[in-house]
Amino acid sequence: MLEVRDVVTSYGMIQALRGVSLTAREGEVTCILGPNGAGKTTLLYTIAGILRPRSGSISFQGRELAGTSAPDVVGRGISLVPENRLVFPHMTVRENLFAGAYVRLGRDRAGVEADLDAMFARFPILKQRAGQAAGTLSGGEQQMLAVARALMARPRLLMMDEPSLGLAPLVVEQIFQIVQGLNREGITVLLVEQNARLALSIAHHAYLLEQGRIAFHGTPSEVSANEGISRAYLGIKGG
Amino acid sequence: MSDYAVSLLVRIGVEAFVALSAYLLLVIGRVSFGQQAFFVIGGYAAGIATALYGAPLAVGIMVGAVAAGVAGALLSAVMAPVGGIYFAAGSLAFGELVRVALLSFHYQVPVGADLTGPAGADGFRGVRALFTGGVSATAFMLAVAGLVALTFLAIALLLRSRWGEAMRMVGEDETASASLGVRVRRVAALTMAGAGALAGLGGGLFVHYATYMEPGHSDVMLGVHSLAYAFIGGLGTPLGPIIGVALDIGLLESFRFLAGYRMIVFGGLVMGLLVVRPRGLLDEVAVHRLSRLVAWGRR
């Protein structure tokens, strides 16, 4: 579904991605692991059209995506749940959800209203908080709002950047159940996550990004079987 | 109505444009200390159009707004990607740059027996279109009030539109906005142009009322006040900055007993409000509650 080939993205003189290739297959959860500064967020921003790659290609459902502007990327069915959630703090929960449907708000008001109801049915807590400023929600509620906001654009591919960041373990589990549920409904997921054990538990395929390059990829069991990786990322002592 | 009351109302109206200009930028999350520059650019351009080239008053005022809008668009080429404290510092620098540039801006043309036009530090005198056109001060005050009301309505409608939605999203979080498909730079650039035009409209009105404008009108205190007006009145509605202006000029400055203490009271008011109501009297929560009250009342 998503094919990233030899993508190079730089901030000025610094190359953050030095030729990254990866594939996210339709209907699967693909996760990207890696230490801080490896380029995980940069990769997601590049796919989302927020950053422009210097070279390489990104194709989505067989069509080229690299260099496409962010509105077109969203329009073609890719949504990002950004790191740290980034909800709009002074807007109400309802307004945040409308903002999620920004690219189709002009032409499909009725569809957006219907999706809003569907989102409230899926996340009852958001309905309770509908008129509340998003900044007053708890971390877990904000993460749910960020996911719901991204879903309002009706994505086929949902990219999630560190959804577990700063959340209590129980809440993290809840968020991951939501991700898994969305995946079972047919949404392809590209997941960046520091919590490697949890990410591998729901992923079909995993990539390891180190210093702007893919260092390893395979199925979750292949990743766990690799002694060096499990020592570094899963905290398992080598025997 | 006394001349004093009329002049006070004109001042409130004129500064409301600069306050609304600063408010538009606050909506997209940018704190500007430089909107006074657009006020003066608009005033000079409008004055040149009417006093030097004989344009009708309304046309001249429009020329001022357009010139300031173009200046805003040009500045946005550099400043649109910049946010936070860098935008604040850059806008402050731009305001001073315009003030200093006008100190050495001479452009005088013979009109009748005299030379008229901007004369550097001596300012730009003899912008008399309002009075030669036979418009009374009261009529002009009413026209200014009408324009403020129209501008308020236009901004209120804008903020309810999809465009306004994009502006508010950019103001809340640029990265999240971009990820949802908002063209952040375009929104910032167009808002800067629009905010410039608004301040320029105020400048064009002012120069014709005062018949005079000088580089000192681009003093940074005008920019600071315009910002403060939005923070006093509230960021939740364009009514906020207008209320802020009315409170400051209408109450503090018009009460003679405050005389020399106005700035102290004003500063104290701003500081106190920032602690108690960081987003002003009519903040988003207040506006939300009021609109629900109105909706309930209609039932």
Image (cartoon, grey):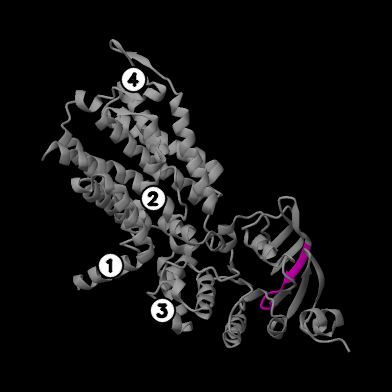
Using a 10 Å C-alpha cutoff, classify the residue at mark 2 as few (fewer than 14 neighbours), some (14 to 19) or many (20 or more).
Answer: many
Q: Select label 2 or label 4 by which is in front.
A: 2
Q: Nearer the viewer, mark 2 or mark 1?
A: 2
Q: Nearer the viewer, residue A111 or A58?
A: A58
Q: Residue at x 76, y 73 (%)?
A: A207
**Which residue lies under the disc numbered 2?**
B227
Residue B80, position in %: x, y? 53, 47
The answer to whether the residue labelled 2 contacts the one labelled 4, judged by CB atoms less than 8 Å apart, is no
* Residue of label 3: A129
- Which SS class for mark 2? helix
Which residues lie in the magenta part?
A20-29
Judge if badges 3 and 1 mark residues of a common chain: no
Q: Position of residue B260 (x, y in %)?
A: 27, 44
Q: Secondary structure at mark 1?
A: helix
Dot 2 and dot 1 residues touching (CB under 8 Å): no
- Are discs 4 and 3 less than 8 Å apart at CB? no
Q: Is residue B150 visible from the viewing direction of this image?
A: no
Give the spatial CA distance, label 2 vs label 3.
Answer: 32 Å
Amino acid type assigned to the residue bearing label 2 in the image:
Leu
Q: Quadrant of residue A96?
A: bottom left
Residue type, label 3: Arg
Mark 3: secondary structure:
loop
Amino acid at the residue labelled 1: Ser
- Relative to B51, B162 lies left or right: right
Q: Which of these two is toward me, A179 or B284?
A: B284
State the residue position of label 1.
Answer: B291
N-terminal of the two: label 1 or label 4?
4
Q: Amino acid at mark 4?
A: Leu
Depicted B279 relative to depicted B110: above or below: below
Q: What residue is shown at x 20% (from left), y 38% (from top)?
A: B7
